[in-house]
Amino acid sequence: MKKIFFALLLFPLFFGCAQKFDERAFKQLDEVKDFFSEHPKAEIDAKLFRKQDIPLLEITISRHCGRKLPEKAYWLAEAFDADSGRRLFAWIDTKTKKADCLFIPPDCKKNSDCDDGNTLTIDACVEGSCIFQQIRASTT
């Protein structure tokens, strides 16, 4: 029993403490407060991206933010209201808990409403919001 308890105490030292998304701080951001005042039933999902992940997401980030973000760890938080189909995305600095970028996809009714003019993306209208999926370029 002592060995198990000791192993549980040492686990965070070897594997690092898991970061937990601060939903309360997220909901305190002005734009997020506005979104939740219009969509009180919206649900939040968040994914942690490490500093080394950010260059791989450059196209998605540029589409959301209109610019590159500094290479550091971020939470990508999504608030989604199932009733209206509206979404809000926020790139949250893991240290400051402030949004470096917020993005609300445009409304749509059909895929053609979402044409971003980029031939390297598949544009789709999903649940009332535009989604842009990057197509991988062939290297052959």
Image (cartoon, rainbow, N blue to C red):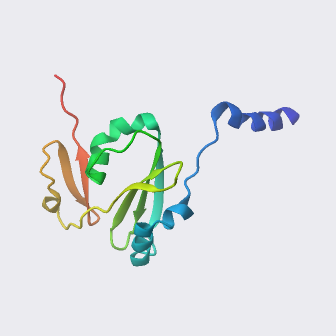
Closest to the observer, 36 or 51: 51
Residue at 82% across / 38% down in the picture? 5
Residue at 25% across / 47% down in the picture? 133
Q: Is 57 on the left-hand or right-hand side of 42? A: left
Q: Is residue 66 above or below residue 104?
A: above
Q: So how many labels did they put on this image?
A: 0
In x, y percent, where is residue 79? 42, 63
Residue at 38% across / 69% down in the picture? 82
What residue occupies the far right of the structure in this picture?
A: 2
Q: Is 93 on the left-hand or right-hand side of 8? A: left
**Residue 70 quadrant:** top left
**Residue 128 quadrant:** bottom left
In x, y percent, where is residue 9? 77, 38
Closest to the observer, 107 or 62: 62
In x, y percent, where is residue 103? 32, 59
Can you say which quadrant of the picture contains the C terminus? top left
Q: Is residue 62 above or below residue 5?
A: below
Can you say which quadrant of the picture contains the N terminus? top right
Residue at 28% across / 61% down in the picture? 105
Q: Is 65 on the left-hand or right-hand side of 42? A: left
In x, y percent, where is residue 22? 56, 57
What residue occupies the far top of the structure in this picture?
A: 140
Q: Is residue 56 above or below residue 63?
A: above
Closest to the observer, 66 or 121: 66
